[in-house]
Amino acid sequence: MAPRPTPPRTPFRYDIRTAADVLGTNFQGYVGSEEDGSPSSARATFERRSLEGDLLGPLNARLVAVGDVFSPAVAIGPRSIGGRGVAVSTVPLDQASIFNRIDLRGELPLGYDVELYVNDVLISGQTAAEQGRYEFLNVPLSPGVNVVRIVTYGPRGERKEDTRIINVSGGLLRKGESTLEFGAVDQNQPLIRFRRFQAFAGREVFARGPRVVAAVNHGVSQYLTLSAAAGSYAPRENLQQDFAVLGARTSLFGYATQAALATNDDGGSGATLAVAGRPFGVSTVLRHSEYRGGFIDENNLAADLMRDVRRRSEITLDGSLPLGGRILPVSLRTFRDEYVDGGSRTVASGRASAAMSGVLYSTGLDYERGSLPGSRAS
């Protein structure tokens, strides 16, 4: 007797999002499901923002968040990671430092695609949501005013565009001015967890554990800002490290300059030097970092964090080229990682976009070369 045919299975998924004013805060909630309709992930955040910086009394905070939040990043060492906890910041909401790349996150419904444009150059795209949102991590910006456009496309031709204006400076504060960033999270763990939850798919290089980061910047003079950071983080599974960072920002011959030294309780250390400016009208950022004793710098997002990095060199160029009476925005980036085991990895990418007859055309070129000990480069 022939086996009875199995009836076709119809997948059923849903995303539920909600926002409301709760106890004087902006509440944002999310619940997502697997294909069988069972809930698998959730987020809940209670947040208050203030452009004037009048939160928490004398602290003059501009951001206070509890629930599913993100820890702050520092110049060398831990980067921004999400989890259940609390975050506080006094940094102006519309400003960023040229030396601190930004993470862009937002809601992404089921079946939607999203693209990221920075100064009219297509930087990246995402076709699937993670925890119900998109993530563009480690996005480099240019000195001055940056126009960041996030465009989402729906399955039925829907199109939505979110434009953000981000003012990027050399990170210098006025004399006597100070800023504070603090975050304490259970990294990669949501506030509400279901049995079928898998901690942030695609983030397996970041282990679970407590992450506490406090960073302070203080303007000593018009041309010198000092910074300090300390805390604890888990860059790998079963590895919890305490760290401390001291740094300075200044301006040398018209070029914004940043230097930072870091150490951890395992005897590791690191140093980074970055210079940014606009030679010949091209926005340029040069960065070089050295590491000893197995120090792990999570800001090297494309590095293999399971191998000890010895050094990284990085160049980012943003400018425009005249082409047939039009202006062609161009973005170039290259970096090279050298590992303690003798291997290396070099990555270079170029992006360009142009608008013609109401249509935006974008193109890109990527190159990668890697080597492992005892094997040929690929």
Image (spheres, grey):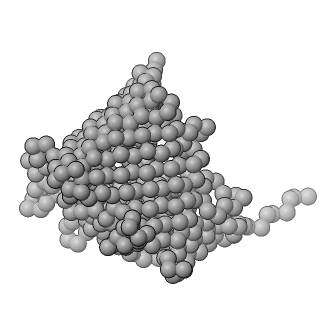
Nearest the eye: 59 or 240: 59
- Residue shown at 44%/56% (left/top)? 182
Q: Residue 255, how many percent across, how many down?
A: 14, 46
- Quadrant for the C terminus in the image: top left
Q: Residue at x 54, y 80 (%)?
A: 23
Please provide percent x and percent y for residue 137. 41, 53
**Residue 107 percent location from the top left of the image:** 48, 69
- In the image, residue 185 sits, relative to residue 300, either above or below, namely below
Residue 194 seen in this snapshot: yes
Whole-percent x and y of residue 226?
27, 47
Q: Going 59% across and 39% down the picture, which residue do you hit?
A: 237
Residue 120 appears in view: no
The answer to which quarter of the image holds residue 253 is: top left
Q: In which quarter of the image is residue 194?
A: bottom right
Q: Which residue lies furthest to the right in this view?
A: 1
Number of marks: 0
Is 245 drawn above or below residue 330 in the view shown? Answer: above
Q: Is residue 125 or residue 15 the one in the foreground? A: 15
Above or below: residue 140 compared with residue 287: below
Picture residue at 40% right of the left edge, 61% below the top: 89
Question: What is the quadrant of the N terminus in the image?
Answer: bottom right
